Amino acid sequence: MRAYVIENVDFWQMSIPTNVNWSFKYILRIRPTVLHLFSGPIQSLSIRSIWDDMHISTPKVSWQHLVWFPGRIPKHNIIVWMSILNRLPTRVRLLRMGLNIENDKCLMCGVVAECRDHLFFGCNFTKDLWGAILALCGLYRGVSGWDSELAWAIYCLKGKSLIVRIFRLAWAGHVYSIWTERNSRPYGGRARPVD
């Protein structure tokens, strides 16, 4: 590691050199935003005060407990997280990105355009699967669309009880299994039934 000696240069007025490492460039770049921290007595400066000053706190999203909970399966929850944010590469999104694919039809039913809302709870295949999962968990209710199912999960799957964790795992497992089934159809060449 090379040491840089800067003599007779005011740190606050110094221009950003090109031959220094990224961390020193970053420190020099944020000087204007932290200058006010050094205006008072140095005894009052602490790591905590710097963190409090620079940290931007945002409220938690309402669905965070569906994605990040003890006992989760990480690969399932990454897909859940991406689906809630609508960032999965469905056929509609791929076409919007400019990729050349043959059509935007759902790979499960082949009738409706494949978007997140249709893929996970709108398609007859996925509705039947989610209904079967709910029945296995002892819950008999009608299956709605994406927004309704997400709202139901946000409202009902709160807490730390074992049954709530099982339902969260079932919800995440459903989303993950639909996504893997969707990917295995064009790339794996196999289509599994709901059973």
Image (cartoon, rainbow, N blue to C red):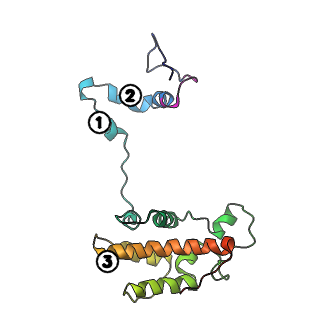
Furthest toward the left, the residue is 43
Q: Is residue 44 visible?
A: yes
Residue 18 colored in magenta in the image: yes
**Label 3 vs 1, first from the N-terminus:** 1
The residue segment tinted magenta is 17-23
Kindly indicate the quadrant of the structure image that contains residue 109. bottom right
Q: Residues within 10 Å of mark 2 (few under 14, many from 20)?
A: few
Judging depth in this view, the residue of 26 and 166 nearest the camera is 166
Dot in front, 1 or 2: 1
Q: Which mark is residue 35?
A: 2
Q: Secondary structure at mark 3?
A: helix
Q: Nearer the viewer, residue 72 or 24?
A: 72
Q: For the residues carrying marks 3 and 2, which lies nearer the camera in this image? A: 3
Q: Which mark is residue 163?
A: 3
Q: CA distance from mark 3 to mark 1?
A: 42 Å
Q: Is residue 21 above or below residue 84?
A: above
Q: Secondary structure at mark 1?
A: helix
- Whichever of callouts 1 and 2 sits on the residue coming sooner in the sequence is 2
Residue appearing at x 33%, y 26% in the figure:
38
Q: Is residue 181 left or right of residue 160?
A: right
- Looking at the picture, which amino acid does disc 2 mark? Leu
Kindly identify which numbered label has been placed on residue 49. Answer: 1
Rendered location of residue 95, percent (x, y): 69, 66
For the residue labelled by badge 2, is the local secondary structure a helix, a strand or a loop? helix
Q: Residue 187: where, in percent of width, then height? A: 68, 70
Magenta stretch prevailing secondary structure: loop
Contact flag, marks 3 and 1 (Cβ < 8 Å): no
Disc 1 residue type? Ser
Q: Write the residue at 33% across / 39% down.
A: 51
